[in-house]
Image (cartoon, rainbow, N blue to C red):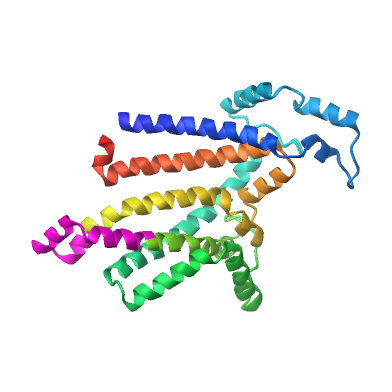
């Protein structure tokens, strides 16, 4: 239990550090949010109006005071209100976050369902036709940017074959079939690069584990190959795969912006870009804080999963 509590403590410190860095970094970005809000048609706003808005938004306070106030609100679960329309930041985040998480979850399931068996089969048949073909496909998945893949899918499946719409979003409760159809293309677009990572890591891990002495001993004892693969090889190979997958998922939490823009998907990443452009401090801080909490929590769960896959980790 002490092993688990130590990791929880480290995770809480990481969240505080990330939130502090974001608080300072967004204020270093050139541009005054009050001037951006008051600018109309490119005309310079009235300095008196800018000063008044600074006072209303609390931007006239010293940086240390703003920092303390921001964290006092965060500890109460209050992410503040948007500088653009005074709407609660938390409400908008909770509306968009499930959409981004659903997109990432769908892409992850597709990548795991294809990448794990493909990597295992490629390693077991090293140098064969399937190994060469899957390795080439994985290399292409890593090399081609997601916005290129997304654009090609729109051109082929939406405009050419007209199987699905080019983009958009429909709630699952409103139209389940259309919801899944609109989710499919962005999920597959993300899954292509994730498949390549899972495939390559699985293949490399299985090849490495297969050469270990205890695997040779199991073969010498006459243990059946399926049992060796499932009980010894695959289980030990999952540890590096889980590590890389957790890092990739953390990256996807903030990196789906291009896919969401290509498919006009109203997720959290698009909201973050709009908030940065508007210098909307509460929105940027709230979104990045939520993403960092999810990222740290995900890595914490991976650490705990290590203890299940390999009991030696609990003694580290």
Residue 60, percent across and down? 77, 24
Question: Is any atom of residue 110 visible in this view?
Answer: no
State the count of labels: 0
Which residue range is magenta in the image?
A: 201-230
The front one of 231 and 13 is: 13
Q: Is residue 211 magenta?
A: yes
| Image location (x, y in percent) of residue 254 | 57, 48
Q: Please indicate, yes or no, whether residue 261 appears anywhere in the rendered image.
A: yes
Name the residue: 61% across, 63% down: 147
Q: Quadrant of the C terminus?
A: top left
Residue 98 is situated, as x and y percent measured from the top left of the image, at 56, 48
Q: As drawn, is 199 to the left or to the right of 234? A: right
- Judge left or right: residue 123 versus residue 300: left
Looking at the image, residue 139 lies above or below residue 303: below
Vertical placement of residue 246 versus 32, above or below: below
Residue 206 falls in which quadrant of the image? bottom left
Q: To which quarter of the image does residue 2 belong?
A: top left
Q: Is residue 47 magenta?
A: no
Residue 49, given in percent of the width and then of the height, sits at 88, 30
State the predominant SS element of the stretch in magenta: helix
Which residue is at a point 61% across and 23% down the rendered structure image? 72
- At 75% from the left and 27% from the top, the residue drawn is 59
Q: Nearer the viewer, residue 173 or 204?
A: 204
Position of the N terminus, as image quadrant, is top left
């Amino acid at each position: 239990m002490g092993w688990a509590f130590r990791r929880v403590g480290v995770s809480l410190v990481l969240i505080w550090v990330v939130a502090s860095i974001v608080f300072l970094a967004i204020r270093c970005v050139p541009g005054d949010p009050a001037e951006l809000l008051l600018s109309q048609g490119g005309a310079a706003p009235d300095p008196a109006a800018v000063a008044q808005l600074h006072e209303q938004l609390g931007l006239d306070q010293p940086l240390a005071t703003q920092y303390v106030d921001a964290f006092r609100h965060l500890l109460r679960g209050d992410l503040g209100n948007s500088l653009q329309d005074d709407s609660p930041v938390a409400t908008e985040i909770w509306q968009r976050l499930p959409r981004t998480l659903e997109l990432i979850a769908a892409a992850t399931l597709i990548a795991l369902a294809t990448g794990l068996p493909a990597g295992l089969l490629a390693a077991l048949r090293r140098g064969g036709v399937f190994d060469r073909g899957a390795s080439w496909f994985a290399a292409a998945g890593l090399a081609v940017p997601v916005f290129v893949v997304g654009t090609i899918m729109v051109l082929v499946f939406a405009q050419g074959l007209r199987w699905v719409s080019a983009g958009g979003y429909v709630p699952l409760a409103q139209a389940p079939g259309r919801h899944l159809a609109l989710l499919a293309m962005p999920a597959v677009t993300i899954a292509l690069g994730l498949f390549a990572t899972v495939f390559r890591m699985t293949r490399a891990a299985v090849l490495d584990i297969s050469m270990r002495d205890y695997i040779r001993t199991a073969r010498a004892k006459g243990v059946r190959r399926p049992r060796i693969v499932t009980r010894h090889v695959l289980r030990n190979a999952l540890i590096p795969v889980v590590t890389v997958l957790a890092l990739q998922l953390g990256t996807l939490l903030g990196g789906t912006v291009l896919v969401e823009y290509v498919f006009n998907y109203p997720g959290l990443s698009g909201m973050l870009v709009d908030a940065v452009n508007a210098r909307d401090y509460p929105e940027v801080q709230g979104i990045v804080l939520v993403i960092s909490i999810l990222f740290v929590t995900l890595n914490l769960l991976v650490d705990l999963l290590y203890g299940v896959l390999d009991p030696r980790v609990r003694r580290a």
